[in-house]
Image: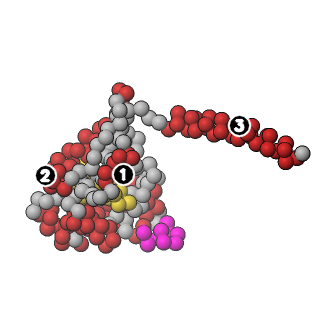
């Protein structure tokens, strides 16, 4: 009797579960699907080919990144067919640039420049400094894989910069923050209060940290230095405004 009752109840239970799951799925889709600008269909773009990458210049890549950033700022990101991009990029990659960014979760690099799968090499570390491992990655990205630009991007309200100024000591973070000390030294002539509570001072250290990283890259990588000298790549710095989403190049 009990078995018969359960068998009779099972279809009702399964129907209820299916309806509940469908409702939840519909809710999720409603919350997460973003319509393309002006109702356009997702762009079925494809990753760059080797020929197209070779035709790029460093200046064209910079222009492309800044134009993409303008679209990001105006909430007009390109609607991409990511599933198609994944499939099309599976056999090779020919990115435009190498971006060295901070680990910060508020800096979504590909979105910031409105770029898709296969467009960028992205290296991330708290404080956006370079070391031998990152240099090797950059050399691969440019010398082997053909990227035309290295862009080092710092940002406002950087926790790594603030922690370095405060001389935080904690596990492996201590050694990591030591990479930012040269930037703090470069900010020794800052006219104002040198404190982690002074946002202007932190911004000065942040920008000096980007500039120091550019110097480090050129000094420690003969490969990249030679490529820049020959006009094959450019190595530039930038900073990201967390309030506006704007990327500005540093001189």
Of residues 16 and 142, the one nearer the viewer is 16
Is residue 134 highlighted in magenta?
no
Q: Is residue 4 left or right of residue 193?
A: right
Callout 2: SS: helix
Which mark, by number, is residue 55? 2
Which mark is first along the chain, 3 or 2? 3
- The residue that appears at 42% across and 58% down in the rendered structure is 103
- The residue that appears at 52% across and 37% down in the rendered structure is 29
Where does the image place residue 207, in percent across and percent down from the top left?
31, 55
Determine contact: label 3, label 1, CB under 8 Å. no
Disc 3 residue crowd, few under 14, some 14–19, many 20+, Cα 10 Å:
few
Q: CA distance from mark 2 to mark 3?
A: 58 Å
Q: Quadrant of residue 50?
A: bottom left
Where does the image place residue 172, in percent across and percent down from the top left?
48, 72
Q: CA distance from mark 3 to mark 1?
A: 36 Å
Disc 2 residue crowd, few under 14, some 14–19, many 20+, Cα 10 Å:
few
Q: Is residue 139 left or right of residue 9?
A: left
Determine contact: label 2, label 1, CB under 8 Å. no
Which mark is first along the chain, 1 or 2? 2
Where does the image place residue 189, in percent across and percent down from the top left?
30, 59
Q: Is residue 182 above or below residue 47?
A: below
Q: Residue furthest left?
A: 230
Disc 1 residue crowd, few under 14, some 14–19, many 20+, Cα 10 Å:
some
Q: Taking the image as drawn, is residue 20 in sight?
A: no
Residue position for label 1 = 86
Q: CA distance from mark 2 to mark 1?
A: 23 Å
Q: Is residue 15 above or below residue 131?
A: above
| Quadrant location, the N terminus | top right
Residue position for label 3 = 16
Of residues 165 and 95, the one nearer the viewer is 95
Where are the magenta residues, as a range? 168-176
Determine contact: label 2, label 3, CB under 8 Å. no
């Amino acid at each position: 009797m009990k078995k018969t009752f359960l068998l009779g109840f099972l279809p009702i239970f399964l129907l209820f579960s299916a309806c509940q799951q469908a409702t939840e799925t519909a809710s999720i889709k409603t919350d997460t699907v973003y319509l393309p600008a002006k109702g356009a269909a997702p762009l079925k773009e494809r990753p760059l080919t080797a020929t197209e990458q070779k035709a790029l210049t460093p200046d064209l890549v910079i222009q492309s990144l800044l134009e993409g950033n303008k679209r990001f700022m105006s909430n007009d990101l390109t609607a991409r067919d990511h599933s198609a991009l994944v499939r099309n990029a599976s056999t090779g990659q020919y990115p435009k640039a190498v971006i060295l960014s901070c680990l910060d979760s508020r800096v979504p690099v590909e979105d910031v420049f409105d770029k898709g799968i296969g467009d960028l090499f992205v290296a991330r570390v708290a404080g956006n400094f370079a070391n031998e491992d990152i240099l090797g990655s950059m050399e691969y990205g440019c010398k082997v894989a053909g990227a035309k630009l290295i862009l080092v991007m710092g940002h406002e309200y950087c926790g790594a910069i603030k922690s370095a100024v405060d001389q935080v000591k904690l596990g492996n973070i201590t050694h990591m923050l030591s990479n930012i000390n040269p930037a703090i030294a470069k900010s020794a002539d800052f006219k104002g209060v040198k404190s982690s509570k002074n946002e202007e001072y932190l911004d000065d250290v942040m920008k000096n940290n980007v500039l120091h990283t550019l110097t480090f890259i050129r000094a420690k990588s003969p490969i990249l230095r030679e490529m820049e000298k020959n006009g094959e790549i450019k190595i530039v710095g930038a900073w990201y405004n967390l309030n506006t989403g704007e990327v500005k190049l540093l001189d």
